[in-house]
Amino acid sequence: MSKKYALMKYSKLVGYVEETDTVVSLIVDLPRMHVTTFMAFSNGHWSQPEQAHGNKRSQKDIERWRELAKVKAGLPGQRHVIPEQATIDLVIDGQGDLEDIDEQSPTF
């Protein structure tokens, strides 16, 4: 197996911009048991962290986060960026004990 094929087969990239204006990029390298993330938070989420916590399954929390995304920063598009790397300690087959997400959610 070529290195290029192995990388494509075992490394996964997930990237998205949430409706809360948070940018997330996640690269999982299973053979090396390594994960790299890049997150960029809106000024509202960064400057008001207590209001930025909650549960994605709660409509009340999502509405609050949408409002936080509208808080103006000093410059258009200014975000607080956090790159991180970590070692994967455990791989679980299936969803484990994670809660189901309502497929009718506006997030989908």
Image (spheres, grey):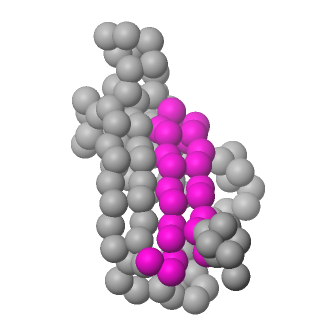
Q: Which residue is drawn at the image coordinates 34% and 36% (left, top)?
A: 81
Q: Which residue is drawn at the image coordinates 59% and 58% (left, top)?
A: 13
- Give the number of marks: 0
**With respect to residue 106, does 79 lie above or below?**
above
How far across and down, in percent of the image, does residue 46 sit? Answer: 29, 34
Q: Is 49 contained in the magenta span?
A: no
Question: As rendered, which of 58 and 56 lies closer to the eye?
Answer: 56
The furthest residue to the front:
2
Q: Which residue is drawn at the image coordinates 56% and 41% (left, top)?
A: 18
> Which quarter of the rendered picture does the N terminus lie within?
bottom right
Regarding residue 29, the answer to whether it shows in the image is yes
* In-image side of 106 versus 48 (left or right): right
The furthest residue to the top:
75
**With respect to residue 22, does 97 lie above or below?**
below
* In-image side of 50 versus 63 (left or right): left
Question: As rendered, which of 97 and 38 lies closer to the eye?
Answer: 38
* In-image side of 3 versus 53 (left or right): right
How far across and down, in percent of the image, does residue 47 sit? Answer: 25, 29
Q: Which residues are magenta?
A: 9-32
Q: Is 18 contained in the magenta span?
A: yes
The furthest residue to the right:
104
Picture quarter containing residue 69?
top left
